[in-house]
Image (cartoon, rainbow, N blue to C red):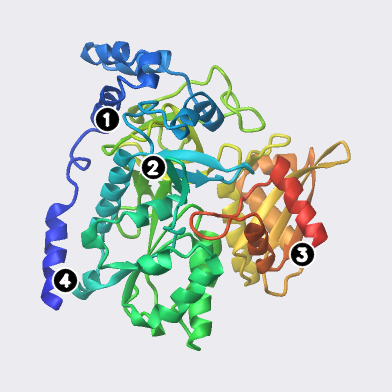
């Protein structure tokens, strides 16, 4: 009934999180780190790295004494260091390793830069924190011009299977599947596709079941990675012989996305809609729910500073990272109050899942230091700088978007590899499009757009970066490769830069297929 929606909407306005709105970011983060250290003080990790000594510095009159002590005692960890030295113990049923208690869930994450799966611990505290941040994001919908009836509809969350793999004392699966398997009871009324379909492990079977059932649901919000949501909507439209998704879900008003830039998908996505909807970006990784877009028509996301995560920032510059994106030994880290607007940083996390000074691999640009606003610009290992061109994923996304607009084509996926060219270098682009495309024309447009966007690239195109190669492939080719690697659905996305083993696998696949 409409009154329910009205009451919900009024209540939401009252219940919006106020603490972060009216508290200094430094104070929030200082408190967060203190809570994390206190909770993990008696773990194996906490004892090894003298958390008690670090905690003593919180009483100092020096406002940064605690942070300097934290950096002095605890080294920076990448995944391999964290897993090989600590997290593997949790998989062997040891308790109190890097966080109190036993770890019962591990999120399987390949990231997008390595071939092997990563095992990221998901603790009870982390699951609660993700739920709390998810609710905070839903509460921001009160800022949008939405009818009261909107709040009575369903939320379609397209993620991994909730049928998790049992491995002795723990379960493993996609983070989305782990979270969906344990939704709070009050939320299950709104959640689609429901428990039965969510357990389906075969991705094509899941999409087909959702497509069949779609008209039975009143879906107002869709949540998921752009590529798979687009495939699902295309399947629903074809299955029911309609012209757009709004003929099936007339009240669809919001799409919540994350994981990759939405810009390359926008043109194809909007062709599937009957009218405009709101797009809301999130920053939900296997290591935690870091940030979300908190107001309309504002593409920056606000970091969540008071819910189980302490952040450090490393300027993403040559003095801190080598040509392979590896961190140099003497790199300095900074707190949220020490960053600069407009500057790019690699992010370190200390979390209530037992990650400590953990390099997540993402690069963000600070939009507003005062409001803790960021945009994701790429990954530490997803950039190309063979000869000083410093090409970021953000540059690539923008160039592809502008090229698609100029040539009036759709390019939902692409990837780039740096390759030798004689004694110098070249970039090889693999571009997904089902339109008629002249590769030479597309190559020239992309090349020019990158020159306009990136001065270093423009310089190197006259020097060591001797050529740009563009190969146009059917869209299905990209998704078939993902499927062949067991990386369909959920949080899986196509890597924007291919290096090493992944590049070898991709080129072999293209040649053989």
Which numbered circle lies on residue 5?
4
Q: Marks 1 and 4, Cα distance to the nearest angstrom?
A: 35 Å
Q: Marks 1 and 3, Cα distance to the nearest angstrom?
A: 51 Å
Residue lying at the far right of the rendered structure: 422
Mark 2 or mark 3: which comes first in sequence?
Answer: 2
Q: Secondary structure at mark 1?
A: helix
Which residue is labeled 3 in the image?
Answer: 439
178 sits to left or right of 392: left
Q: Residue at x 36, y 15 (%)?
A: 47
| Image quadrant occupied by the C terminus | bottom right
Instruction: Mark 1 and mark 4 in contact? Answer it, CB < 8 Å.
Output: no
Which residue is labeled 1 in the image?
Answer: 32
Residue 513 appearing in the image: yes
Mark 1 or mark 4: which comes first in sequence?
Answer: 4
Residue lying at the far bottom of the rendered structure: 241
Return the x and y of residue 276 as percentages of the image width and height: 39, 74
397 sits to left or right of 422: left
Q: Residue at x 73, y 47 (%)?
A: 503
Which residue occupies the foreground of this view, 205 or 453?
A: 205
């Amino acid at each position: 009934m409409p009154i329910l929606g009205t009451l919900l909407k009024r209540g939401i306005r009252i219940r919006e999180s106020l603490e972060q709105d009216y508290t200094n970011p430094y104070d929030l983060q200082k408190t967060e780190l203190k809570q994390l250290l206190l909770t993990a003080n008696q773990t194996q990790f906490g004892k090894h790295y003298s958390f008690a000594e670090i905690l003593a510095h919180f009483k100092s009159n020096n406002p940064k004494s605690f942070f300097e002590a934290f950096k002095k005692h605890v080294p920076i960890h990448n995944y391999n260091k964290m897993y090989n030295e600590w997290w593997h113990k949790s998989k062997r049923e040891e308790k109190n390793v890097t966080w109190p208690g036993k770890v019962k869930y591990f999120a399987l994450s390949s990231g997008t830069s390595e071939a092997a799966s990563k095992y990221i611990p998901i603790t009870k505290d982390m699951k609660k924190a993700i739920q709390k941040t998810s609710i905070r994001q839903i509460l921001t919908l009160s800022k949008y011009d939405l009818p009261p009836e909107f709040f009575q509809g369903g939320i379609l969350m397209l993620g991994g299977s909730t049928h998790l793999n049992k491995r002795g004392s723990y379960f493993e699966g996609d983070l989305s599947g782990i979270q969906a398997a344990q939704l709070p009871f009050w939320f299950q009324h709104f959640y689609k596709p429901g428990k039965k379909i969510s357990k389906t492990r075969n991705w094509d079977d899941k999409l087909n079941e959702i497509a069949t059932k779609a008209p039975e649901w009143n879906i107002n919000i869709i949540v998921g990675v752009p590529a798979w949501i687009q495939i699902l909507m295309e399947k629903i439209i074809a299955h029911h012989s309609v012209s757009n998704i709004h003929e099936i879900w007339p009240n669809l008003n919001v799409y919540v996305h994350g994981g990759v830039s939405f810009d390359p998908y926008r043109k194809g996505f909007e062709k599937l809609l009957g009218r405009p909807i709101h797009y809301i970006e999130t920053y939900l990784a296997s290591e935690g729910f870091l940030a979300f877009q908190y107001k309309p028509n504002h593409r920056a996301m606000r970091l969540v500073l008071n819910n189980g995560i302490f952040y450090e920032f490393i300027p993403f510059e040559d003095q801190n990272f080598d040509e392979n994106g590896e961190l140099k030994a003497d790199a300095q880290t900074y707190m949220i109050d020490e960053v600069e607007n407009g500057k790019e940083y690699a992010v370190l996390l200390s979390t209530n899942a037992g990650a400590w000074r953990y390099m997540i691999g993402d690069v963000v640009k600070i939009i507003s230091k005062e409001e803790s606003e960021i945009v994701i610009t790429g990954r530490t290992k997803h950039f190309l700088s063979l000869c000083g061109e410093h090409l970021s994923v953000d540059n690539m996304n923008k160039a592809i978007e502008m090229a698609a607009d100029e040539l009036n084509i759709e390019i939902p996926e692409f990837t780039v590899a740096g390759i030798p060219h004689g004694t110098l270098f070249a970039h090889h682009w693999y571009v997904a499009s089902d339109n008629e495309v002249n590769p030479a024309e597309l190559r020239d447009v992309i090349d020019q757009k990158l020159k306009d966007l990136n001065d270093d690239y423009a310089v190197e195109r006259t020097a060591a970066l001797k050529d740009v190669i563009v190969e146009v492939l059917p869209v299905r080719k990209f998704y078939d490769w993902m499927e062949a690697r067991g990386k369909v659905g959920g949080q899986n996305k196509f890597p924007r830069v291919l290096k090493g083993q992944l590049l070898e696998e991709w080129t072999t696949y293209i040649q053989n297929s």
